Image (spheres, rainbow, N blue to C red):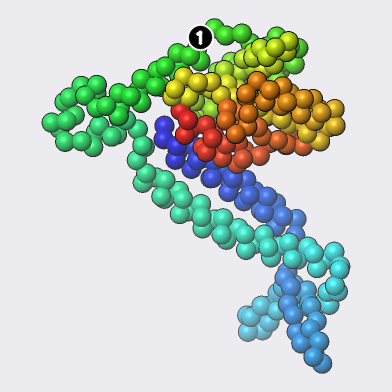
Amino acid sequence: MSAIEPLAEEIVLILTHEKEIYTKILDQSPEGRLLSEKSNNKVRLLHAVRSGNDASGKPRYKRSRVYDGSPLLYALADKEYAQSALKIIEHDLRIMTFAFDQLRSYSQENIFAGMHPAYRSLPHDCFQASRQAAEVQRMQHAWASEPYEISDYRPEEKIHTTSRGLKVRTRAELLIAEFLYRYDIPFRYEQVVHIGAYTLAPDFTFLDQSRTEFFWDYCGMMGDQKYRAHQLWRRGVYEGAGITEWDNMIYTYDASDAIDMREIEAVIKTKILPRL
């Protein structure tokens, strides 16, 4: 799977979700729309609601005054905003659906298929770039499947199960793991790290091309003072052992486990994939 495929799916999902939100706003909106008229150099706002047709068949509207700060004014404003947003969303979805249907998957299989037949008959090992990428990927997957020391801290809290059977503690970790699967990124969950007298376990551990491990800690409850203090202590222990944010540790923070998948995908694309 190429990087564009999950990204495309995620964009469509986001737009579809936004469409549902604005459609719901419209469903709950009052009839009619807002008009304005100028009288004595003052602008008056009017609520216009269709009330049938006149004798010639033209639509007839009933108009009533709308005052600043009224709930009706805010409801009509939200309605107009939702209608304008839906036009853009529906346009973008049509364009994206057409464009993505035309995309070819950026895969090794398609790369070889596009070569001249004389080259397609050669063993894949003849192509150094392909060989090196395959070797690194095999090495990383083998590393991820090897037995490792996993944290035994409160195992009863691991109540969420990924699509591949991994037990994790939080919904955020579940979503992150699924994104890592989607990008075919090998990882270890809560691998134990011994630092002096302390035993810690970063949420996710990865192996880069040079066989060096690096880590990702998702800190999802930073709004809680006790949790925040503990995370700052952990960070100090890590940094004392040379595990630093500017080198081999990635931190993401949220106040109440309200995960932003756009941020998670950005971390994967900019901080993890380039190292693999």
Q: Position of residue 168 (x, y in %)?
A: 66, 19
Q: Residue at x 52, y 38 (%)?
A: 270
Kindly indicate the quadrant of the structure image that contains residue 32.
bottom right
Q: Is residue 138 above or below residue 71?
A: above
Q: Position of residue 14 (x, y in %)?
A: 59, 45
Q: Is residue 160 visible?
A: no
Mark 1 burial class by Cα count in 10 Å: few <14, some 14-19, many 20+: few
The residue that disc 1 covers is 146
Q: Position of residue 171 (x, y in %)?
A: 69, 27
Q: Find the residue positioned furthest to the left.
A: 118
Q: Residue at x 19, y 29 (%)?
A: 120
Q: Find the residue positioned furthest to the bottom.
A: 40
Looking at the rendered structure, the kind of residue marked 1 is Glu
Indicate left or right for 267 with 59 as reference. left
Indicate left or right for 98 with 87 as reference. left
Kindly indicate the quadrant of the structure image that contains residue 124.
top left
Q: Nearer the viewer, residue 120 or 40?
A: 120
Q: Is residue 155 above or below residue 218?
A: above
Q: Residue at x 78, y 77 (%)?
A: 46
Q: Is residue 131 above or below residue 62?
A: above
Q: Nearer the viewer, residue 152 or 201?
A: 201
Q: Secondary structure at mark 1?
A: loop
Q: Residue at x 72, y 22 (%)?
A: 237
Q: Is residue 5 above or below residue 243?
A: below
Tell me the quadrant of the picture where the N terminus can be found. Answer: top left
